Image: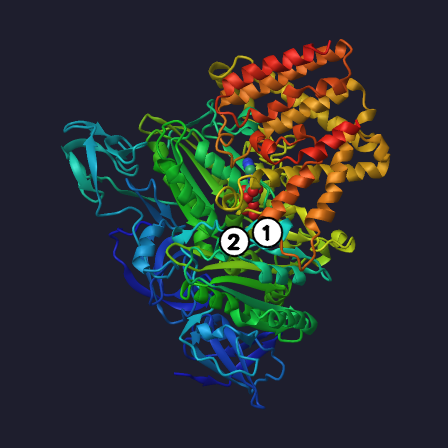
């Protein structure tokens, strides 16, 4: 969290009451959303309501033993994040306190309170390579220099967006801390590698553009059927245990974004640990560098204070926007937005606000759309283009999608990956229901796939969709009369659809090879199934009984393409074998 | 500094409101003395400069306006020492076994602090429970929180006891590794019947498990509000034994449903805006603050593994108690009424059951290299067989293909041979997986598409497969 704010801390208010994370204070001179320090221990909080002389504060730390009468101080500044080199490879809590620094400062594996730490290391020096020289004119967000932050990412040092800009009168080059002035302007503005931004306001950008490039995920069902665009929004709702987190992790690992911001919002501690342990060892498929080099983690787990759960998504998206301003494609995963909504509900009920649907505050829908609005493919004010894609998990109570958080989210996002308990139960993973899910980006992304993967990408996909649809209809009949009562061609369709499900849609996130599937391979697997389909129907027409066709040895090999590293050869041979063996039947 | 007040203004359900003229800390402990000399303990739920709301643990009967209220100036603490092992305590942590007073080495607030996610170590050490449906299909690992989703009248306690009795980490048996880390059980009972309590205590005593256990007993006729404290006492003790004294602690909490009812009661008394089905909106956070106290910590020998038990009202897993639990824990084991009435012991319904930490806890060097594939394949085959059962009811077995019939047989055998084992049988992981291969070998090799081909060559039990083929 940003704390190098120079605005002096004023000694003013007094605690009037304490109830869980909500504290009221009297005589506090503060503005809405100002950060305040509460009680003798200086617990961090934020002003969320002002009524007469009473100020209501949500406290980001545990409030046990805090009592009325203790002092409250306002910093006079809103909740902000520190932006600068040092955020990649970091793990923060919901108010951008680095968890590794907290561990060190607290000397314990347990989170104590009243300890603060800046979001980026203020003492560490970075190699600053200027991109401007004396006399150059620079404006807001213009890049003044580069810091090679990690092997994957060059950190672009920008003029803060709220600066006026002017002519450069002094430029430094070499190793400096984030607090040193590295560029000076003629109007006296000093540019440092570190800037601050209030988390609840969107960073300025020029224009949102229609996204036309996919965020390639390496997940067959996503790239193949329900692609997400760079700058797009997606929701993954599903009951517990259906695969939200695994899907989010898969995207964080394999999506072809430049930067990944992963927000663990009110979920499990071990899931964050898994990321911390796995990511440094995994390779980014595009750059070959460690995945951690492009990743920023925000972990506000379910047992951490609820108010910081409310703020963690804002912390995350502000960091994402900062990298977008540098011209990067950023992907933000929020797991789970429901916990964020519940945190809003909890605070709102402590404020005794009028509850809306299912106890959620009336402003739930507005907050959700404000958040997702911060996603997009942008023309930045410094002339670059960058994107923020947002993928939000939703955890509907009882797995029932009719509840307010799911419904309000679906009204905003353009991609819907519906997880299905039934599929998860039979270990069909990813348990994304292909009948219910959709992507409104599909058409605008087709040209990219056609140019970069295969010219008949869209046709091939349509064939898969039609076959799966047909299966769905046939299954209803099968449920009543059994498969053998169907005409032979329909039996064959069922068999083809089974391979679509097993060989194409299913993908094992835990298999070393299968975990990532490039679009070319996604296309090739589909192609192989199509070959089987075409050969099989020809044979059927030639009078071969369906049992004989489906008993052909080679067919079951379709299910093994996913795990092949050398899949090109494998598919070529397999297609030959299938054709040969089926043709051998007549 | 203990100021005494006689300023009670309102008593409502488990809550007492009193006026104060000096500041009182949030969450602080309160003692209320009734006119007839009874002392009740409670905790500050809301503190303002002129009044406080107190939640009384031991019931408000007998409290009146003349009762005196004392604020102790500290939050609720658990007295901790290794000597707690072997002791039986009440739901609020007082000895009830007739033994000596607890002489603590230290005291800790029972609320506990969150483990810094950065300091955690990812759990991946296989615990062998000796129960095939768990070890083979839903593997438990050290530091996991894996609840049992059950229903009233089902044998979830027998299963919990079986796990507590049989749980080992295989390599330890051989005496390698892990110098001095011992196993301990913490048992936190909330609102269970005397009969259930006896069942647990008898088993503990008979097997000598009591010596390495700490028991917290809040029975059905004990005060309901006390139930909100019991699991916190238990978990504070668990953390102490695990992270100070290097024990591998297994915490069994039963019945979480009673705990949640107590939360609902307090919420209602405070006239809070209720969430789903009348349970407080903050129940997710509250439960998370219990369940997340499982885990491993980098650099510490011990671990806290949790098996909370809950009875699903109406056997409905969308009810807020199992639902919120499932969203927090790392999987769940379903105990099923139908399987139970078929006499399957333990009646674990494998399909909806899940262990999310299984993937990293199994495989070569941990369990066996064929484990993941075998379990995947059995899941798929059992699911397929289960589906066909509905169809069979309509069209009969004859109308089904030979392939379908094999799956039906598989599903039956899976239940009666693999899941069924009895509460006293302890199967090693090798036995469990070999049994799995025997069952899978009823299916034609080509059907085993989730298993690596080399493994099939190695493990497929040929003769069975061949006899079936020969019959064709
Ligand atoms: N793509 C996948 N490949 C293999 N296994 C998967 C996949 N997706 C999910 N799973 C399995 O499902 C389990 C549950 O998935 P996950 O933890 O993502 O659920 P969730 O929807 O996030 O649940 P919760 O809401 O409780 O957090 C995983 O532990 C894993 O075993
Ligand atoms: Mg999850």
Per the image, the residue denoted by label 1 is: B428
Whether residue B269 is visible to the viewer of this picture, yes or no, is no
Near mark 2 (Cα within 10 A), the count class, few <14, some 14-19 or many ≥20, is some
Coloration mode: rainbow
Q: Position of residue A262 (x, y in %)?
A: 43, 41
> Which label belongs to residue B165?
none
Mark 1 touching mark 2, by CB under 8 A? yes
**Which of the two labelled residues, at mark 1 and mark 2, occupies the earlier sequence position?**
2
User: Viewed as shown, does residue B424 lie left or right of A165?
Assistant: right
Q: Position of residue A188 (x, y in %)?
A: 17, 39
Answer with the quarter of the image where residue A479 lies: top right
- Looking at the picture, does residue B140 appear above or below residue A230? below
Q: Position of residue B133 (x, y in %)?
A: 64, 49
User: Viewed as shown, does residue A269 lie left or right of A432?
Assistant: left
Answer with the quarter of the image where residue B103 lies: bottom left
- SS at mark 2 in the image: helix
Whether residue B161 is visible to the viewer of this picture, yes or no, is yes
The picture quadrant for ligand 1 comes to top right
Q: Nearer the viewer, residue B441 or B399?
A: B441
Q: Nearer the viewer, residue A278 or B373?
A: B373
Pinpoint the chain carrying mark 2. Answer: B
- SS at mark 1 in the image: loop
Q: Is mark 2 within 8 Å of ligand 1?
A: no
> Which label belongs to residue B170?
2
Q: Is there one chain holding both mark 1 and mark 2?
A: yes
Point 36% across, 51% down: residue: A99
User: Viewed as shown, does residue A209 lie left or right of B90?
Assistant: left
Near mark 1 (Cα within 10 A), the count class, few <14, some 14-19 or many ≥20, is some
Q: Position of residue A122 (x, y in %)?
A: 24, 47
Q: Quadrant of the C terminus of chain A?
A: top right
Q: Nearer the viewer, residue A213 or A55?
A: A213
Point 53% across, 26% down: residue: A223
């Amino acid at each position: 969290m940003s704390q190098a704010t120079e605005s002096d801390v004023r000694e003013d208010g007094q605690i009037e009451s304490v109830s869980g994370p909500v504290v009221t204070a009297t005589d506090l001179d503060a503005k809405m959303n100002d950060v305040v320090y509460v009680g003798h221990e200086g617990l961090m909080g934020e002003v969320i309501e002002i009524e007469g002389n009473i100020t209501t504060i949500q406290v980001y730390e545990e409030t046990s033993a805090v009592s009325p009468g203790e002092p409250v101080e306002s910093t006079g500044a809103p909740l902000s994040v520190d932006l600068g080199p040092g955020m990649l490879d970091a793990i923060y809590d919901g108010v951008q306190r680095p968890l590794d620094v907290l561990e060190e400062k607290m000397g314990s594996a347990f989170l104590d309170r009243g300890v603060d730490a800046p979001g980026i290391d203020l003492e560490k020096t970075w190699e600053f390579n200027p991109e401007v020289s004396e006399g150059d004119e620079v404006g807001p967000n213009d890049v003044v220099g580069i810091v090679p932050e990690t092997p994957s990412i060059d950190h672009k040092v920008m003029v803060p967006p709220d600066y006026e800009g002017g002519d450069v009168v002094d430029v430094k080059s070499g190793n400096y801390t984030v607090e040193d002035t590295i560029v000076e302007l003629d109007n006296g503005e000093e540019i440092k590698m570190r800037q601050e931004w209030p988390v609840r306001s969107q960073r300025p950008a020029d224009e949102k553009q229609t996204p036309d490039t996919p965020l390639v995920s390496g997940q067959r069902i996503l790239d193949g059927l329900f692609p997400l665009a760079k700058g797009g929004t997606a929701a993954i709702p599903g009951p517990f245990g259906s695969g939200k987190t695994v899907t989010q992790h898969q995207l964080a690992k394999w999506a072809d974004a430049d930067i990944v911001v992963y927000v663990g919002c009110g979920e499990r501690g071990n899931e964050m640990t898994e990321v911390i342990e796995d990511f440094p060892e995994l390779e980014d498929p595009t750059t070959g560098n460690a995945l951690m080099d492009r990743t920023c983690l925000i972990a506000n787990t379910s047992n951490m204070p609820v108010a910081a759960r409310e703020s963690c998504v804002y912390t995350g998206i502000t960091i994402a926007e900062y990298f977008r301003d540098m011209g990067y494609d950023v992907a933000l995963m929020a797991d789970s937005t429901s916990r964020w909504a519940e945190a809003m509900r909890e605070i709102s009920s402590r404020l005794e606000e009028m509850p809306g649907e299912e106890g959620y505050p009336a402003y739930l829908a507005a907050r959700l759309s404000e958040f997702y609005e911060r996603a997009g493919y942008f023309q930045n004010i410094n002339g670059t283009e960058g994107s923020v894609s947002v993928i939000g998990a939703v955890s509907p109570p009882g797995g029932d999608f009719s509840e307010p958080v799911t419904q309000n989210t679906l009204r905003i996002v353009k991609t819907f990956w519906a997880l299905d308990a039934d599929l998860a139960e039979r270990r069909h993973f990813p348990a994304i229901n292909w009948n219910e899910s959709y992507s409104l980006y599909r058409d605008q992304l087709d040209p990219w796939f056609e140019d970069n993967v295969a010219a008949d990408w869209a046709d091939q996909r349509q064939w898969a969709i039609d076959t799966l649809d047909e299966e769905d209809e046939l299954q209803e009949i099968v449920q009543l009369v059994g498969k053998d009562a169907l005409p032979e061609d329909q039996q064959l369709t069922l068999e083809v659809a089974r391979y679509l499900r097993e060989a194409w849609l299913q993908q094992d996130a835990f298999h070393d090879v299968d975990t990532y599937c490039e679009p070319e391979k996604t296309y090739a697997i589909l192609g192989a199934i199509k070959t089987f389909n075409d050969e099989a129907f020809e044979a059927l027409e030639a009078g071969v009984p369906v049992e004989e066709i489906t008993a052909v040895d080679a067919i079951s090999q379709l299910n093994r393409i996913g795990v092949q590293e050398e899949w090109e050869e494998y598919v070529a041979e397999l297609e030959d074998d299938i054709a040969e063996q089926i043709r051998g039947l007549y | 500094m203990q100021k005494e007040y006689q300023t009670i203004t309102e008593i409502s359900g488990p809550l007492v409101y009193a006026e104060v003229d000096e500041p009182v800390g949030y969450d602080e402990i309160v003692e209320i003395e009734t006119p007839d000399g009874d002392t009740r303990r409670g905790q500050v739920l809301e503190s303002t400069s002129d009044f406080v709301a107190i939640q009384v643990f031991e019931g408000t009967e007998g409290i009146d306006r003349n009762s005196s209220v004392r604020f102790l100036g500290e939050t609720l603490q658990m007295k901790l020492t290794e000597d707690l092992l072997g002791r039986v305590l009440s739901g609020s942590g007082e000895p009830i076994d007739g033994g000596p007073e607890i002489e603590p080495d230290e005291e800790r607030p029972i609320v506990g602090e969150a483990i810094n996610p950065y300091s955690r170590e990812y759990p991946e050490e296989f615990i062998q429970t000796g129960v095939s449906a768990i070890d083979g299909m839903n593997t438990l690992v050290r530091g996991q929180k894996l609840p049992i989703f059950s229903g009233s009248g089902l044998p979830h306690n027998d299963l919990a006891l079986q796990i507590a009795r049989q749980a080992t980490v295989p390599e330890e048996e051989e005496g390698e590794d892990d110098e001095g880390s011992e196993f301990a059980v913490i048992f936190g009972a909330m609102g269970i019947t005397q009969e259930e309590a006896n069942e647990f205590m008898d088993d503990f005593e008979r097997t000598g498990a009591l010596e390495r256990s700490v028991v917290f007993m809040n029975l059905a006729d004990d005060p309901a509000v006390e139930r909100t404290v019991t699991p916190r006492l238990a978990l504070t003790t668990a953390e102490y034994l695990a992270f100070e004294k290097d024990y591998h602690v297994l915490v069994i909490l039963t019945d979480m449903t009673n705990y949640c009812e107590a939360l609902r009661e307090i919420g209602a008394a405070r006239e809070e805006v209720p969430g789903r089905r009348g349970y407080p909106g903050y129940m997710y956070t509250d439960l998370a603050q219990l369940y997340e106290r499982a885990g491993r910590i980098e650099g510490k020998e011990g671990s806290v593994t949790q098996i909370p038990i809950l009875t699903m009202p109406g056997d409905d897993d969308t009810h807020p108690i199992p639902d919120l639990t499932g969203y927090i824990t790392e999987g769940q084991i379903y105990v099923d009424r139908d399987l139970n009435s078929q006499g399957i012991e333990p009646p674990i319904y494998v399909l909806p059951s899940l262990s999310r930490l299984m993937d990293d806890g199994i495989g070569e060097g941990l369990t066996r290299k064929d484990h993941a594939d075998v379990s995947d394949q059995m899941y798929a085959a059992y699911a397929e067989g289960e589906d066909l059962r509905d169809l069979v009811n309509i069209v009969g077995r004859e109308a089904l293909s030979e392939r379908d019939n094999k799956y039906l047989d598989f599903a039956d055998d899976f239940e009666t041979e693999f899941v069924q084992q009895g509460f006293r049988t302890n199967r090693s992981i090798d036995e469990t997986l070999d049994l799995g291969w025997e069952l899978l070998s009823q299916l034609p090799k080509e059907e085993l598409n989730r298993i690596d081909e080399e493994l099939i060559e190695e493990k497929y039990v040929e003769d069975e497969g061949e006899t079936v083929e020969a019959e064709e």
